[in-house]
Image (cartoon, rainbow, N blue to C red):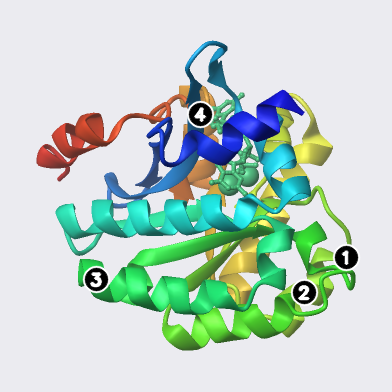
Amino acid sequence: RALQRDLEHAIEADELFLVYQPFLDIRKGRVTGFEALLRWQHPTRGLIPPTVFIPIAEESGLIHQLGEWVIRRACTMLSRWPDDIRIAVNFSAVQFQNVGILQTIVDALAEANVAPNRLEIEITESMLISKYGSAPAILHALLELGLTVALDDFGTGFSSLTYLRKLPFSRIKIDQSFIRDMLTQPDCAAIVKSVIGLAQELRIGVVAEGVETADQLEYLRQTSCDEVQGYLIGRPMSGSEISALLDHNP
Ligand code: G
Ligand code: G
Ligand code: MN
Ligand code: NA
């Protein structure tokens, strides 16, 4: 496929870049970090969304190179930002088939002189299913290196509770579909409240995704959610916009 051929050259052609979407700590009222989201500026087709090119990268195996590029870029940005700021990167299931990712992470952190606990890996529940046999092993290795791991899109996959028992996640990210409907659907509010309570009992962090209105933020404040992410707090932004934002972070 033509897009796949183009994607093979995207890294060297400098067509890939990251945008960063903030996490806001509700209690402290300050930004604690960012999720890195990959973008591809294609020379003729314009901006191609990750929902289009990530599946191509996964099928072709290019995801390994892309994933390594994302890690290195994130570490470089971390080295420029304050020590108490973290970056979360998204992982594809197929990246768990490559044990080499561990050495890449170790090297990238060392080259940038960045503490491992500032790098977070976001994985989804569906990635933990048996097809990817080495996923739990690599996850444990990441945790041993001192990285943190977040369970992304929580509530949309299968048997989440089993994985919460087996793996020491640092954080749960409540999927944006629950946040969107929680103020109009009582059942949805009940789920959001329960997941926040569950995280508290497990002593792990909880992030609400897709927060778009002040009413949603207020509700999450009242239910003791730790962090929020979404267009209300900030859209995904360029590295230079983030540096400016951090200059005014309380
Ligand atoms: O902003 P948004 O359109 O960026 O993201 C769409 C989807 O693409 C999300 O599910 C997100 O997790 C995924 N995504 C964004 N960047 C990356 C990346 O660097 N690696 C992987 N595997 N997925 C990504
Ligand atoms: O699957 P993952 O949670 O990694 O994907 C995050 C996706 O959600 C990205 O595409 C990002 O651009 C998008 N996103 C982030 N905040 C909001 C929001 O407030 N509203 C909506 N509709 N999408 C959001
Ligand atoms: Mn994510
Ligand atoms: Na998510």
Residue shown at 61% from the left, 66% from the top = 199
- Give the amino acid type for the residue marked by disc 3 in the picture: Glu
Query: Relative to residue 119, is residue 44 depicted above or below?
Result: above
The answer to whether residue 225 of the structure is visible from this angle is no
The spot of residue 161 in percent (x, y) is 80, 70
Q: Quadrant of residue 183?
A: top right
Q: Nearer the viewer, residue 146 or 250?
A: 146
Q: Nearer the viewer, residue 106 or 122?
A: 106
Q: Quadrant of residue 71?
A: bottom left
Q: Which residue is mark 4?
A: 40
Q: Crowding at label 2, few (<14), some or many (≥20) Cα neighbours within 10 Å?
A: some
- Separation of marks 1 and 3 at Cα, in angstroms: 38 Å
N-terminal label among 2 and 4: 4
Q: Which residue is mark 2?
A: 163
Element marked by disc 3: helix
9 sits left or right of 172 in the view: left
Element marked by disc 4: strand
Q: Which residue is mark 1?
A: 159
- Give the amino acid type for the residue marked by disc 2 in the picture: Tyr
Q: Which residue is mark 3?
A: 111
Q: Quadrant of ligand 2?
A: top right
